[in-house]
Amino acid sequence: MNGVLVYHLAVSAFLLLVSVQVALNWRLFVAPRPREFAQDGTAPLVSVLIPARNEARRITPCLRSLLVQDYPNYEIVVLDDHSDDATARIVLDHGFDRDADSPHRLLEGRSLPPGWTGKSWACHQLAAAAKGEYLLFTDADTLHEPAALGAFVGHALDTDAALLSAWPRQLTGTWSERAVIPLVYVLLLGALPHYLLRRLQRRPEYARGVSRTTLETLGAANGQFVLFRRDAYQRIGGHAAVRDHLVEDVALGRLVAARTGEGMRLINCDGSRLVHCRMYTSFAEVWEGFTKNLRAAFAESGSSFWLFGVLQTGGLLLPFVFACLPGLSGRWWWIPVLQVGWLYALRFVLAARFRTSRLGALLHPVGQGLSLLIGLNSWRLSAQKGVTWKGRTYTMTTAASAPGVVEEDGPAL
């Protein structure tokens, strides 16, 4: 058996594994339904917490969507993280004030201490000011349907979730957004074994026999919508426990997953019909945002970063090269053609499920290639001068550790 055939068979096995994992995760990744709560004050108080740094362009739709929620018992707290634009004024114009007793209030962020990332520090301050039994951390660029809060609180109660993370519909405009951002869903259902974590949650005695390090690899969350039960948030140490992580949402999900044997439940769900988000609006933002995240997502494991890159290159990108250059495969030319069809089928199914761009699915090889280039840039900058985000530079404390040294570059642009 020649090497080319061995490679094609290995890729086919990889695609089969990804497809089986998507199928197993599919039914567990439910979309919560709207839930009505009584107006008698029995619904748990929810603190909606929004860190905001120079969000004047985006925060108005977010605030408007949150102020009209059907849920009867909630407060909204916004933290202005040293913005040098009109963020604070816009928040105050929407009826917020600085009174600690107000149900909708604006906080002024304190100076960033050493060893913290900006978002974790902002969220830490928000949690300290929150009064709710549930803490919802959400971003200033999210939009929430009126039924969203009730649906997700209801689902958290039904599933006894310590942490419930909803994955919004990702709105995209430019070609780079459409090509890269929907790849998140391929990784979400194709790379994370939600079904395995759910089985361990049902039988925590089995989870107690699994190392915490292994359990952590089963966890993830999306910082665009993270709903914590307050006692669980405090139990894992809150954002202080992930103070130096650039991808604090994933790190928080891993901390909860690591405590599965103690009865804590991490629930990820489909929020695409109730929450919407446009993460980035240009190629430059896509490049900078994912550069910040990709290396940091693997924390101390540089080898995992490279292994993941090799699998993506070999299994999700090179089949297109072989299909376009049939001479490379000889008489086995038809195998990569089938693999390309397989990949496109997978992408279009996921696009339909999460209501993402069909053009993005069609641009799969472009998006996959671009994401690999961003990954290489993320590794390069993380190992050298550091990555930048919202006017701050984050460097690596050691050659292969989580980002920890924080330098201020002045106001965000």
Image (cartoon, rainbow, N blue to C red):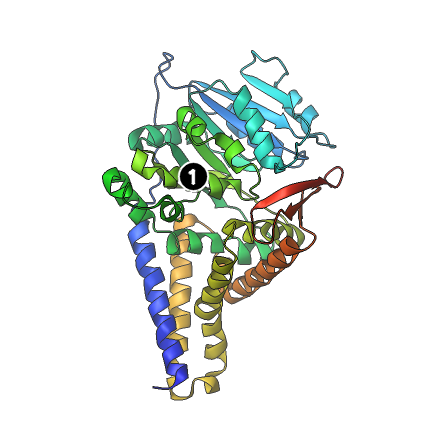
Name the residue at 66% across, 32% down. 113
Q: Is residue 170 above or below residue 238?
A: below
Q: Is residue 368 above or below residue 253?
A: below
Q: Which residue is mark 1?
A: 255
Name the residue at 47% across, 78% down. 322
**What's the residue type where badge 1 is placed?**
Leu
> From the image, which quarter does the N terminus lie in?
bottom left
Q: Is residue 118 visible?
A: yes
Name the residue at 30% across, 59% down. 20
Name the residue at 40% across, 24% down. 231
Residue 43 is drawn in which quadrant?
top left
Q: Position of residue 11 (x, y in %)?
A: 38, 71
Q: Is residue 296 above or below residue 166?
A: below
> From the image, which quarter does the C terminus lie in?
top right
Badge 1: residue crowd in 10 Å (few <14, some 14–19, many ≥20)? many
Secondary structure state at the residue bearing disc 1:
helix
Q: Position of residue 222 (x, y in %)?
A: 47, 42
Q: Position of residue 54 (x, y in %)?
A: 68, 35
Left/right of residue 400 with respect to residue 57 in the rendered view: left
Query: Between residues 359 and 55, which one lies in front from this camera angle?
Result: 55
Residue lying farthest front?
398
Left/right of residue 27 with respect to residue 150 in the rendered view: left
Q: Is residue 34 visible?
A: no
Q: Position of residue 120 (x, y in %)?
A: 57, 35
